[in-house]
Image (cartoon, helix red, strand yellow):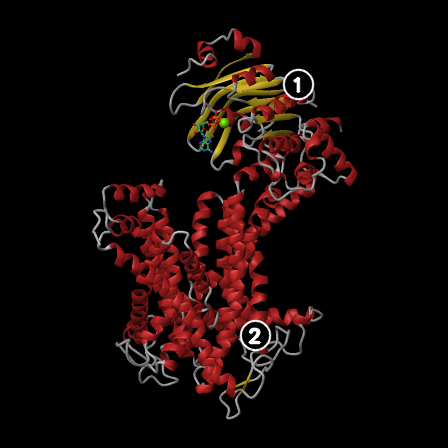
Amino acid sequence: MAKQIEVAGLDAYYGAHKAIEDITMTIEPRTVTAFIGPSGCGKSTFLRTLNRMHEVVPGARVEGKVRLEDQDLYGPDVDPVSVRRTIGMVFQRPNPFPTMSIYDNVAAGLRLNGRFSRSELDGIVESSLKGANLWNEVKDRLNKPGSGLSGGQQQRLCIARAIAVRPQVLLMDEPCSALDPISTLAIEDLISSLKQDYTIVIVTHNMQQAARVSDKTAFFNLAGQGQPGKLIEMDDTSRIFTNPGQKATEDYITGRFG
Amino acid sequence: MTTVQTGIQPISTSRRVKDRVVQALVYLAFAIAVVPLLSVLWLVVKNGLARFDLEFLTHSMRNIGARDAGGGAYHAIIGTLEQVLLASLIAVPIGLLTAVYLVEYGAGGRLARWISFFVDVMTGVPSVVSGLFVLAFWVLALGMPFSGFAGAMALSILMMPVVVRSAEEMLRLVPNDLREASYALGVPKWRTIVKVVLPTAFTGIVTGVMLAVARVAGETAPLLLTVFFTDSINNDPFSGPQMGLPLYVFDQAGRPTDTAIDRAWTGALTLILIVMLLNLVARLIAWWRSPAKRG
Amino acid sequence: MRRSAFRRSRGDVPFRVASIGAGIVLLAIMAAIGVFLVVKAIPALQANTSNFLTEKIWTPNATEPKFGIAALAFGTVLGSFLALIIATPVAIGVALFISHYAPRRLAAVLGYVVDLLAAVPSVVYGLWGVAFLVPFMRGPSEFLNTYFAWIPLFGGDQVVGKSMLTASIVLAIMILPIIAAISREVFLQAPKMQEEAALALGATRWEMIRMSVLPFGRPGIISAAMLGLGRAMGETIAVALILPATFGISFQILGPNGNSIAANIANGFGEATTIGRGALIASGLVLFLITLVVNMGARLIIARRKEFARAA
Ligand SMILES: Nc1ncnc2c1ncn2[C@@H]1O[C@H](COP(=O)(O)OP(=O)(O)OP(=O)(O)O)[C@@H](O)[C@H]1O
Ligand SMILES: [Mg+2]
């Protein structure tokens, strides 16, 4: 079910402000792709163009092409709702629905999409929570509110919620930035195991994390203040971290940036 | 079938339809809310313009018989202006000082919490009850006559909580740095409040007061019980019955003749113009205050 | 006593006292409202020859005063609940329209339009009600009575324009902007994070609202509705102009039935004797207490919600 994403000549705007410019890349199926780059260079913006969440911001728009295998995500008769259903997303800050129980949080996406019997739902909720490495911690309190969990647990709950609907791609925007090292490790392990079934894209500021979990790494940078962000280079992670093609990449990775 | 399973699956028709239906209902709700407003404004303007003339604005109802045309609302306009002005003179100082207490002195204390709670309770006092209170206290217990001033007292009770709440909100918006900078210069607290805090919040407070004024200018029930009625001009709000524009509309609307109904519409038009003008001025002040928001 | 170099500035004490004083005046006014209404109601209640709570008739000016709050309180509650039932769904729709449906620029303007609705004085709605809505409602009322008489509210042999239904509609129009304005503020505060969570799961706009906006906004809607209810109960003039001012208890809202405490005060004040005025004050006290309970309930919900928001 994992799918390849092809991006060609993509620009994204917030009103009149162009946040990213002319991005072209291919994201391989069943791999983890990491986006790295300085703050404000448009990593989140780009990530959000991949499942049409960008246009949720008032005044925001996109130019260029994004293809999921052979389908144009921005095609005239493509419904953004179904794009988001197909390409799941995990946010920087855990955002479970506060009024819903743990169980209902995981089932939320499923309930939108069709009728499931109680036992089917139970099965999917359990397998999603297991997939997110959370099952053992919450199996006795599935009916308690999700907001009662720790930050790391909440984030894994959000991952469970995202994978419960069986997306083809999973986008993660700094999923560990609000978490402690142990929860971070748990999520990194999770990413490695999810890779078997999903195409995963992860934004991170943590070089070690990028090096640990990803197969490919894309480096983004700003040409200057107020300029749009650009893709500088994208390659195998091992290559980016040992022998990058661009000077800017090397400077950023070795911390000699700016 | 296989392509459907692997590609972007369109969402089900029923979900799409439900989304559309709700959207239609939401638009419809807005239309339903606007229709009465348009109808009210249209009828008030259409029917009100017939008698919106110089005579209406400069004459009272004195010596106008039950079936006579003519007559005006001069006495009511004067009455409303005086009553609202007096009400503001009572309510604004009390409301403003209370807000100062809540924000600058009492912050979080027991008394401040009680006052704050009762300001909320006061917001919910029905206007007719404030009129009854002034009737019971001023007219019946103290034996004072019906007068414009009695009406102003009733209106001021309705104004006070509005003034307190809006002033409180504005005072809280004043950054603490400003206060601290002033204290650091050795300026005493009260002078800091008078010279730094209040001027900074000034336009916001004025906006709040104007909105409060606009609200009470249209109140009828409290006047009915405190100002009573008169058809003649009474420029002195401290003695004898006065008239007020809302009361005038109520009075004329209750009379069975067409000429009276015409006067009621024109009175309503005048009242709406006054209230809208006050609202407009308040919003202009608020807009002028925040040049940043214009961008 | 030695004067300290750090003594308070001379103006500080008077200013502080003045500001505390103002707050206390405010408390005193609230207390005085209760006290004076009670004091002036008591003589009339003593002169009353029937039970104030259960009597429906209102003849306090007679030589044998007879008056009771039953019919008036019933009318007040019925009318304002009907208004609430009519206004709340529309107000929620209006609030959602402004917060989540209308384009951003338009939304700001439309917000002003709704506030404008709130600025129209109630006597103007009253005038509009008698002159336009009362005749207008005869047709629809006949229709309801003909085809829906099996619903008790729409039953009855007589159908008039000056009815409880018409008054409730005017009340609904008057409280709609209040409910809409508060709900709108609450909806605008709904956390963007949860909205995006719902959208990223593939929720449509409505599903997103149902999953993240409405659960968040529920306490706000409830308290807004209760504040609206309080306002409807206290509304006087519009209702006084429209209601037929009868003294009975009937659920038939299309017929010539209906009255309210506030309307009765406005209608009865002109010819009231001393006992009559006392009786009206007594009824005002009841109105005050009812609205007090409703408003405090609303405030409690808001306060609980604040704590909840702080905790989250
Ligand atoms: N909602 C928004 N409205 C307007 N401009 C925005 C918005 N979100 C981001 N931007 C702008 O777009 C540019 C890219 O922002 P983006 O959030 O994509 O950066 P980022 O690379 O994710 O940064 P970080 O590493 O700090 O998360 C920035 O200049 C930012 O100011
Ligand atoms: Mg980011």
Mark 1 residue crowding within 10 angstroms, few (<14) / some (14–19) / many (20+):
many
Q: State the residue in front, C117 or B149.
A: B149
- Which quarter of the rendered picture does the N terminus of chain B lie within? top right
**Furthest residue in direction bottom, as rendered:** C63
Q: Position of residue B285 (x, y in %)?
A: 31, 52
Quadrant for residue B253, please give it. Answer: bottom left
Tell me whether circle 2 and circle 1 mark residues in contact (CB < 8 Å).
Answer: no
Point out the frontmost of discs 2 and 1: 2
Q: Amino acid at mark 2?
A: Ala
Q: State the residue in front, B286 or C12.
A: C12
Residue under disc 2 on the same chain as residue under disc 1? no
Q: Position of residue C42 (x, y in %)?
A: 48, 82
Q: State the residue in front, C203 or B130.
A: B130
Is B50 on the left or on the right of A76, as rendered? left
Q: Position of residue C281 (x, y in %)?
A: 47, 78
Residue at position x 54%, y 59% in the image: C225
Per the image, the residue denoted by label 2 is C73
Per the image, the residue denoted by label 1 is A30
Q: Is residue C43 visible?
A: yes
Which mark, by number, is residue B71? none
Is B253 on the left or on the right of C93, as rendered? left
Quadrant for residue C273, please give it. Answer: bottom left
Chain for numbered disc 2:
C
Residue at position x 41%, y 74% in the image: B133
Chain for numbered disc 1:
A
Quadrant for residue C249, please give it. Answer: bottom right
Q: Amino acid at mark 1?
A: Arg
Q: Secondary structure at mark 1?
A: loop
Q: Position of residue A108 (x, y in %)?
A: 66, 39
